[in-house]
Image (cartoon, helix red, strand yellow):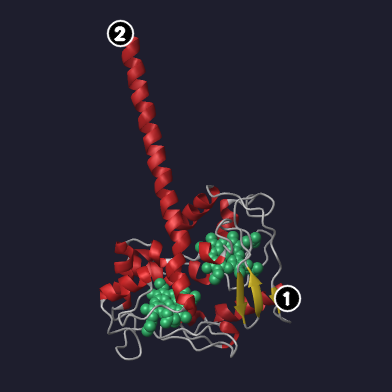
Amino acid sequence: MTNLEKRKIKSLFIISFIILILYTHTSHSNENGKILSYAAGCYGCHTSDPNEPYGGGYKIKTKYGIFITPNISKDKNHGIGKWSKTDFINAVKHGISPSKKPYYPVFPYNWYSNMQDEDILDIFDYLNNMPLSKNINSSHDLKFPYKIRDMLWLWRLINKNLQKNQITNLDISKINRGEYLIKSVVHCSACHSPRTFFSIIKNHENLTGRTKSHKSLKDGAPNISIDKIKGIGSWSQSDIVFFLQTGIKPDGDFAGKDMSKIIENGTSYLNKEDLENISMYLLSSKNK
Ligand code: HEC
Ligand code: HEC
């Protein structure tokens, strides 16, 4: 073999190695982005037609009126294709738009505020590789005075002042993955925690259930604390894992509508280890 041939083979090796590293890196973050996007409900809330994933148009009925989710595909004109990484983090973690307007808290940014930036950027990268949707955003159909977006500054102020209700600065290094997923990604407390006026959560750590917010809305959610009688303290770890994969309860009953959506579009995408971590947290003394 000549020296030239040897050098060619050597550089071929180096190039394939770099390609391999790049490939495994991007596919890893894309996989993480995909799993988190399902688990966090981004897919479920921003998709009304499965042929147009992330094209928005999904309706959320609340006592304040109907919210219609926006297109978050990377289409430059109809979606968020012109957004920078910082725009995306500001929206998802802080609920502030690129034009510095507040978002309505139905978009659960209050929970995502504890997500790690790398995880959010993995979602951003994953969206980058999804097909574009040309769906045009519809405006929400809200009652007065909730339709005045600037009112949200007041809401944010009240919410912020009730600091004890917030899980601010969750120390990711001190908690396990199950607690991280529950408190920030899958946001179980968005439905399973009691709420006060203006739908402000009483205490994010409290999963003792929520009563209906309005008589025409069936949006109550049961107690999932460790209490053996009122909550799910009598479930085993594998009961919880199985439920979050399939929607089947230990007594053979199926999950109701809202919860089955969370399972179908969310927790069923998590791997067994993540689900075991979630169930361990739910059955620990932290979940009183
Ligand atoms: C419970 C439903 C729900 C979930 C879950 C949800 N969103 Fe949203 N999202 C909304 C609604 C509703 C709005 C519109 C808020 C407004 O108009 O103030 C919104 C707005 C947005 C916007 C702003 C779009 C724009 O054009 O200004 C982005 C970006 C976004 N969501 C990304 C995400 C990501 C990423 C996730 C997952 C980590 C997610 N959303 C999860 C309901 C949801
Ligand atoms: C969008 C609102 C919503 C979110 C988010 C949500 N749940 Fe639920 N969940 C419900 C509702 C409503 C029910 C009652 C319907 C039913 O029985 O399945 C329920 C039922 C359950 C039950 C069955 C309780 C019983 O006694 O039958 C469990 C367990 C549960 N949820 C766990 C979770 C966990 C864990 C999370 C977060 C990983 C979560 N849920 C997130 C709305 C939600």
Query: Dividing the image into 4 quarters, which one contains the N terminus?
Result: top left
Residue behind mark 2: 2
N-terminal of the pair, mark 1 or mark 2, is 2
Residue behind mark 1: 148
Q: Point out residue 20 in the picture as x, y percentages from the top left corner.
A: 37, 36
Would you say 198 lies left or right of 40 here? right
User: How far is disc 1 from disc 2 in space, using C-alphas?
Assistant: 76 Å
The amino acid at mark 1 is: Ile
Would you say 216 lies left or right of 4 here? right
- Compared with 259, 38 (above or below) is above
The amino acid at mark 2 is: Thr
Residue drawn 30% across the image and 80% down it: 250
The label on residue 181 is none
Q: Point out residue 222 in the picture as x, y percentages from the top left corner.
A: 42, 85
Residue 62 visible in the displayed image: yes
Residue drawn 33% across the image and 64% down it: 274
Residue 174 occupies which quadrant of the picture?
A: bottom left
Residue drawn 31% across the image and 83% down it: 251
Q: Point out residue 54 in the picture as x, y percentages from the top left corner.
A: 57, 58
Residue drawn 43% across the image and 44% down it: 26
Residue 64 occupies which quadrant of the picture?
A: bottom right
- Compared with 207, 28 (above or below) is above
* Secondary element at tag 1: loop
* Secondary element at tag 2: loop
Query: Dividing the image into 4 quarters, which one contains the C terminus?
Result: bottom left
Of residues 52 and 175, the one drawn nearer to the viewer in this rendering = 52
